[in-house]
Image: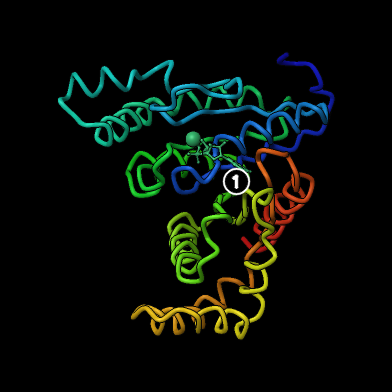
Amino acid sequence: QAAAGAGSESCAPPVCVLVLGMAGSGKTTLVQRLTAHLHSQNSPPYVVNLDPAVRELPFAANIDIRDTVKYKEVMKQYGLGPNGGIVTSLNLFATRFDQVMKFIEKRQNTSQYVLIDTPGQIEVFTWSASGTIITEALASTFPSVVVYVMDTSRSTNPITFMSNMLYACSILYKTKLPFILAMNKTDIIDHSFAVEWMQDFEIFQDALNQETTYVSNLTRSMSLVLDEFYSSLKVVGVSAVLGTGLDEFFVKVSEAVDEYEREY
Ligand code: GDP
Ligand code: MG
């Protein structure tokens, strides 16, 4: 399968797509779907799994952290619980990430995209030294984008939505990379309500007025602050299960990379 479809004779480096998001948002399912989509376009991606604790991967990874680090054994050996086991496994893997980079570099001319699935719990990656090391190694070598996957069906409450956006915003600041918000699970609910909230402050306020909790005042002020974040944000609605929105997804990825390269 490796060299097939490698037809793209372009010498442009592959684009690294780093998939982040809360546990259960659909990262792994999205990586699976993106992989299938690219295969069908005769442009097989290079796929990396960084989740040491995933039981079954629905896609064939070119590099799988589980081949190098056995998370259950790490737990036993270091006397750790599940979270410590995941963090330590990622640390152990990060120390050998230069080897991973060599593998990816070898595939430079055959893959247009490198897709990276990250651990279920987002903070394991975004708030750990190893996550930072891995992100920086990738981003300093290849054009890279961060895809923040949001569970749209779980963000229909304006306050929950706002919390999710604040989290997304913090990741943008942490990684300082081109950023795409993938509103996933649009087969359950269309993402237009969320897009409206981001485009029209008053519609969001109206939704908030239905809320009487004490945080709603804070949320009101926050939404003004986030306006700036929203205005430059690339948003795409997808369904990882149905595979909808993927063409638009890749358009946004290209735009994000182009804009970033023009600016920096
Ligand atoms: P991860 O923890 O972010 O990797 O999330 P998974 O990819 O493992 O998905 C978590 C759950 O959400 C699984 O039960 C998936 O089947 C489900 N899921 C993922 N994407 C979608 C989607 O687009 N639509 C629906 N309805 N369910 C989804
Ligand atoms: Mg996953």
Q: How many labels, in total? A: 1
Front residue of 118 and 184: 184
Q: At x 60% / y 46%, what residue is drawn?
A: 144
Q: At x 58% / y 79%, what residue is drawn?
A: 204
**Residue 209 versus residue 39 in the image, above or below:** below
**Residue 65 versus residue 160 in the image, above or below:** above
Q: Which amino acid does label 1 sit on?
A: Ser
Query: Does label 1 point to a residue whose CB lies under 8 Å from ligand 1?
Result: no
Position of 42 with respect to 133 (left or right) is: right
Q: Position of residue 225 (x, y in %)?
A: 49, 80
Number of residues whose C-alpha sits closer than 10 Å to that of mark 1, classed few (under 14), some (14–19) or many (20 or more): many
Q: Where is residue 166 in the image (x, y as percent from the top left)?
A: 45, 66
Q: Where is residue 243 in the image (x, y as percent from the top left)?
A: 73, 39
Position of 40 with respect to 233 (left or right) is: right
Q: Where is residue 46 in the image (x, y as percent from the top left)?
A: 64, 27
User: Which quadrant of the render holds ligand 1?
Assistant: top right
Front residue of 59 and 204: 204
Residue furthest left as drawn: 79
Q: At x 44% / y 22%, what residue is drawn?
A: 55
Position of 257 with respect to 95 (left or right) is: right
Residue identified by numbered label 1: 144
Position of 69 with respect to 107 (left or right) is: left
Position of the N terminus by quadrant: top right
